Image: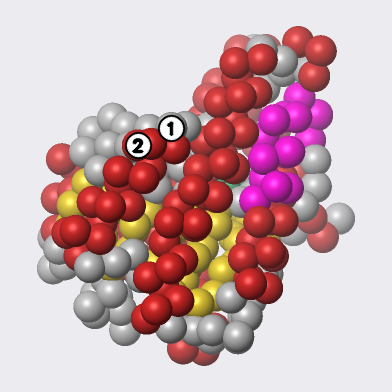
């Protein structure tokens, strides 16, 4: 379905981003990976799916590096057809204790980076009259939790950016939507499981149950594979007129 399309997935060396990159690759899209840590492993997993894959190591907190990455994708593949804004970090502290540098980093990586990639990808998408922008927000783009001020502010912000981008592109073949996962067991969440296990003197399995029990009636983690299939749907012809939604996949978290 996505042969001859190129997808740039930010923060795709791990977790949800890698799951989405693999799902798009399975549909034939060429992939540009981004993120820190091991690059060769994710690259060979994508190459094994029979598509072209490349990597740019832009730090998503830096506008100049994002500009460089967008030029790299255009030079390598012609343009970014599918943009998945996924890179994100978390920091947990009460507002009055929140380190200012962590606030700035969360807002830059989880919100401002999507503004930069979107503004730079849109001209070529408009010219082609086809494009898909998928913002990985969170249930925290819809509801709040204590001690996550920067994250909740950034995720509510990216849901807002999604709606504005969807309105501005509404008469075109470019769509913009957000995905709002509940708990997904990635390194970002394992850190929170570890913190709970340490604070309450629990095993890893017990801490996972406590974490799920606080928020997710299904008592199940959503998987990167499931989120990847939602991204594939947003890229399909059936989703041509799905614009500006913030679609939660959260085991019932925000239904409560
Ligand atoms: P993760 O830690 O597994 O992956 C984060 C990715 O972002 C990694 O590839 C990392 O290298 C990259 N990254 C971090 N800082 C970066 C930077 N400055 N520049 C470039 N890349 C950077 O986390 P994840 O859980 O897969 O999170 C992915 C997205 O999903 C985030 O936006 C997160 O907020 C969102 N999300 C996660 C959950 C969850 O439960 N895990 C729930 C809702 C939303």
For the record, the magenta segment spans 145-158
Pointer 1 local density, CA inside 10 Å: few below 14, some 14–19, many at least 20: some
Q: Which SS does the magenta portion mostly show?
A: helix
Q: CA distance from mark 2 to mark 1?
A: 5 Å
- The vertical placement of 108 against 2, above or below, is above
Circle 2 sits on which residue? 65
Return the x and y of residue 223 as percentages of the image width and height: 49, 54
Q: Is residue 211 left or right of residue 25?
A: right
Circle 1 sits on which residue? 62
Residue 68, by quadrant, is top left
Task: Return the residue found at the far bottom.
Answer: 238
Residue 147 covered by magenta stretch: yes
Q: Nearer the viewer, residue 168 or 6?
A: 168
- The vertical placement of 219 against 40, above or below, is below
Q: Label 2: state its secondary structure.
A: helix
Return the x and y of residue 50 as percentages of the image width and height: 13, 68
């Amino acid at each position: 379905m996505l042969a001859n399309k190129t997808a740039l997935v930010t923060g795709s060396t791990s977790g949800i981003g890698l799951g989405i990159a693999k799902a798009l690759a399975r549909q034939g899209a060429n992939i540009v990976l981004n993120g820190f840590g091991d690059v060769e492993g994710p690259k060979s997993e994508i190459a094994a799916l029979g598509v072209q894959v490349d990597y740019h190591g832009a730090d998503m907190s830096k506008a100049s590096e994002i500009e460089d990455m967008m030029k790299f994708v255009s030079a390598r593949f012609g343009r970014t057809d599918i943009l998945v804004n996924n890179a994100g970090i978390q920091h947990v502290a009460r507002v009055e204790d929140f380190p200012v540098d962590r606030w700035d980093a969360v807002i830059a990586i989880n919100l401002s980076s999507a503004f930069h990639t979107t503004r730079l990808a849109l001209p070529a998408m408009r010219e082609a009259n086809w494009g898909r922008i998928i913002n990985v927000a969170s249930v925290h783009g819809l509801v709040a939790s204590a001690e996550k001020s920067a994250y909740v502010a950034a995720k509510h912000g990216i849901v807002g950016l999604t709606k504005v981008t969807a309105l501005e592109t509404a008469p075109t073949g470019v769509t913009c939507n957000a995905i709002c996962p509940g708990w997904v067991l990635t390194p970002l969440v394992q850190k929170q499981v570890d913190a709970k296990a340490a604070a309450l003197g629990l095993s890893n399995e017990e801490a996972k149950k406590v974490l799920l029990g606080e928020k997710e009636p299904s008592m199940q983690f959503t998987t990167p594979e499931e989120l990847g299939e939602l991204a594939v749907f947003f890229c399909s012809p059936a989703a041509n007129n799905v614009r500006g939604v913030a679609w939660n996949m959260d085991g019932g978290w925000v239904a409560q």
